[in-house]
Image: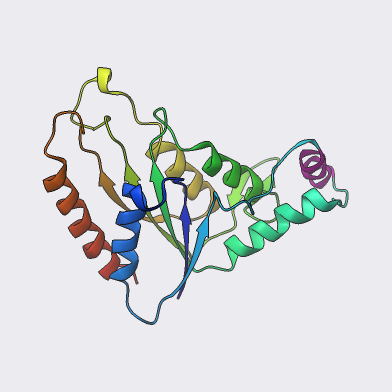
Amino acid sequence: MKLLHISASPRGEQSESRALAATFLGALPEDVEIEEYDLWDGTLPAFGPAAVAAKMAVFAGAQPEGPDWQAAVATFERFAAADAYLFSVPMWNAGVPYILKQFIDVVSQPGMVFGFDPEHGYTGLLTGRKAAVVYTSAVYGPDRGPAFGSDFQAPYLEDWLRWTGITDIRTVQFRPNLATADAESARRRSHEEARREAKRFR
């Protein structure tokens, strides 16, 4: 099995999501091939006017072209070459970091991630794969009131994964209220959960 770890945190060694991801990866069987993709490493292409025009050309039945489109295709091919995925995702303003949204916009192309039928709608083309997601947040928690924020992070990412055809989704969460909670005990529990999920990720 080849696993692609897609990291959406720019915080390096200070990142809680990266630390949990490292625990998950360290607990995987030795025969799993792991590739790291740091979305902040400068290789993720933009998806601007030229790329959007090429995408619309596909919908119109024309042949897309141009370097921006080829960069999107290359990013998708790197993504699609994996059998499984690990996403490490900090919460930013109740949602995902913009760099992860950029990645999703780059790879979500017709004939690659999805098919479309005017009568039946979308069909995900990445079936047979699986994903694990590490979610972190510093203030939001599902047991806290609305004054502590809302969760548009997990619903957005998991809806997108299911839309692509990936329905086997495992999650690990670390959501302490860092201002008041005992973060260290919550951190230990989350790392233990990451090890358990990794051992079941076959």
Q: Main secondary structure of the magenta part?
A: helix
**Across the whole image, how many numbered discs are drawn on residues?**
0
- Horizontal side of residue 55 vs 94, given as left or right: right
Whether residue 59 appears in magenta in the rendering, the answer is: yes
Position of residue 198 relative to residue 159, above or below, is: below
Range of magenta residues: 50-60
Position of residue 180 relative to residue 59, above or below, is: above
Residue at (36, 53) in percent of width and height: 13
Q: Position of residue 169 (x, y in %)?
A: 37, 55
- In the depicted view, which residue is nearer to us: 172 or 122? 172
Q: Position of residue 133 (x, y in %)?
A: 37, 52
Residue 20 appears in which quarter of the rendering? Answer: bottom left
Q: Position of residue 163 (x, y in %)?
A: 52, 47
- Horizontal side of residue 92 vs 201, given as left or right: right
* Position of the C terminus by quadrant: bottom left
- Horizontal side of residue 202 vs 118, given as left or right: left
Residue at (21, 64) in percent of width and height: 196
Position of residue 145 relative to residue 136, above or below, is: above
